[in-house]
Amino acid sequence: MNKDENLAKAEDFKKSAERMYKDSISEQHPFSRFCRLDESTKLMKNAANHFRLAKDWRNAANAFLKAAQIKKENGCNFSSLYEEAAKMQMKYDKTAALQTLVLQAHSHCAQGEMSSAASVKEKIGEIYEAEKQHLLAAKSYSEAFELREMNALIVPLSTFDLLLKAAELKVLVEANKQHIQEAIQVYENVRVPRI
């Protein structure tokens, strides 16, 4: 299929998904409503994938976000759809992608998936670090450490690398004495458990 065919197919799937979603609102029986919402999600994901094939990143991201919204309304796990939307958004708007990844981390936390939330926070930190936003990267790495710590009975030593990375980034920001003192404190705290 060429770009125009994929765009036309995407629009068809999107319209069908929206129709199915509207039908689900008036549905009285819970099981029928669930089925209609599930079908609407599938159609919206198909639309997103066709937008992706056509390299229409913005519409692909919006379709993935709409599918996540529908799936959330249906009481199902929707975190992976946020991840797909963020991948599309990274191609045209990193700020929007970061906001979507934050939503993904929150959805993992709400479902008790702390390890998955930590992985997303770590990914956010990597993006901020690449963008030279060191304080925001340090904050994300620290949050990732806290989530991993919360999830484990015994915190693996490799998890402390997140704290060390956060401390390193704080020192890079500027010659701010408070950040340097915080970094020193982190290094001292991490060094003690490793000895």
Image: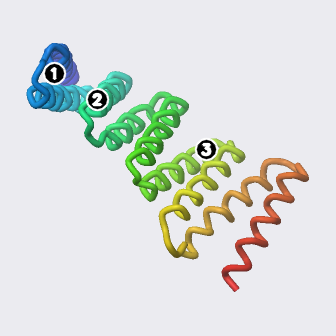
The picture places residue 123, in percent across and down from the top left corner, at 51, 50
Query: Position of 181 compared to 33: left or right?
Result: right
* Residue highlighted by disc 2: 73
Give amino acid for label 1.
Phe
Give amino acid for label 3.
Tyr
**Tag nearer the camera, 1 or 2:** 2
Query: Position of 191 compared to 43: left or right?
Result: right
* Residue highlighted by disc 1: 13
The residue that appears at 46% across and 45% down in the rendered structure is 105
Residue 141 occupies which quadrant of the picture? bottom right
Residue 72 occupies which quadrant of the picture? top left
Quarter of the N terminus within the rendering? top left
State which tag comes first along the sequence, 1 or 2.
1
Tell me if residue 161 can be seen.
yes
* Residue highlighted by disc 3: 128
Query: Position of 29 compared to 70: left or right?
Result: left
Give amino acid for label 2.
Glu
Mark 1 and mark 2: span between their CA atoms? 20 Å
State which tag comes first along the sequence, 1 or 3.
1
Crowdedness near tag 1: few (<14), some (14–19) or many (≥20) residues, C-alpha within 10 Å: many
The residue that appears at 32% across and 43% down in the rendered structure is 80
Which structural element holds mark 2?
A: helix
194 to 52, vertically: above or below:
below
CB atoms of marks 1 and 3 within 8 Å:
no
The picture places residue 2, in percent across and down from the top left corner, at 18, 25
Which structural element holds mark 3?
A: helix
**Tag nearer the camera, 3 or 2:** 2
The residue that appears at 9% across and 27% down in the rendered structure is 32
Query: Position of 140 compared to 38: left or right?
Result: right
Mark 3 and mark 2: span between their CA atoms? 31 Å
